[in-house]
Image (tube, helix red, strand yellow):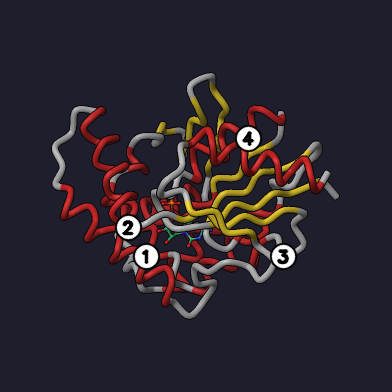
Amino acid sequence: MAVVITIDGPSGAGKGTVCARLAEQLGWHLLDSGALYRITGLAASRKQIALDDDAAVAAVAAALDVHFEPLATGVQVMLEGENVTDTIRTEKVGSLASQVAALPAVRAALLQRQRDFRLTPGLIADGRDMGTVVFPNAEVKVFLTASAEERGRRRYEQLLDKGFNASLPALIEDIRARDDRDSNRAVAPLKPADDAITIDSTELTIDQVCEHVADLVRKAG
Ligand code: C5P
């Protein structure tokens, strides 16, 4: 079976950037599992399905017509032929994602779809439960975290760069609420796998984090 490196952690810890860079450096596949929950939340809300109706949202998750197309600028996400790459990154869709992610049948419906990404030569899997549930036998497991204030500040700068208005205290509050929901849910809560190595990126640059993870991969290989 192909090698898997799992990188789990709360939103804003830098997982997305680190995973994309590593996948590119190694020439491996990339699983952005959060995108699957975001797409499920978006698709269910468009179909006006109640976001606490586990069976109905799971049916949407099982039937998703979604494609990830690698481009030079990143991965383009297509839902039923529509480019939803930017739409799924909004705070609103992040909140839909975290609501549907708390539903057990939805998580079960997305499990095999995520495991199908494990292809040679290897996979970098980005999420909350990659090392605990989806790939429990992964070769390297990382738990990447940072303080809520620092994660809020990073998100704030990203939004300003894109020309959006944002309130830093509101962003930190959102991040705390999402952490709380993700860590305290009954199924697949956000927590490090027993055999994960925790990296706190609060005081580190993205380059330093990538170097640290690449080092773990070299040592494991
Ligand atoms: O990583 P991202 O912010 O895109 O994830 C959106 C939401 O999807 C998270 O807040 C979390 O609730 C959920 N999620 C999850 N399990 C994963 C990935 C994401 O529950 N493996």
Q: Does the residue labelled 3 lie within 8 Å of ligand 1?
A: no
- Give the label on residue 35, or none: none
Mark 1–mark 4 contact, CB under 8 Å?
no
Residue designated by label 3: 136
C-alpha separation, residue under disc 1 versus residue under disc 3: 22 Å
Can residue 63 be seen? no
Other-residue count near label 4 (Cα within 10 Å), few / some / many at <14 / 14–19 / ≥20:
many
C-alpha separation, residue under disc 3 versus residue under disc 4: 20 Å
Residue designated by label 1: 179
Label 2: which secondary element: helix
Q: Which of 211 and 30 is in front in this view?
A: 211
Mark 3–mark 2 contact, CB under 8 Å?
no
Residue designated by label 4: 22
Q: Which of 161 and 92 is in front in this view?
A: 161
Identify which amino acid the numbered label 3 is placed on.
Pro
Mark 2–mark 1 contact, CB under 8 Å?
yes
Name the front one of labels 2 and 1: 2
Label 4: which secondary element: helix
For marks 3 and 2 on the same chain, the one whose residue lies earlier in the sequence: 3
- Give the label on residue 148, or none: 2
The residue shown at (54%, 41%) is: 209
Q: Is mark 2 within 8 Å of ligand 1?
A: no
Quadrant assignment, res 45 = bottom left
The residue shown at (34%, 67%) is: 51
Mark 1–mark 3 contact, CB under 8 Å?
no
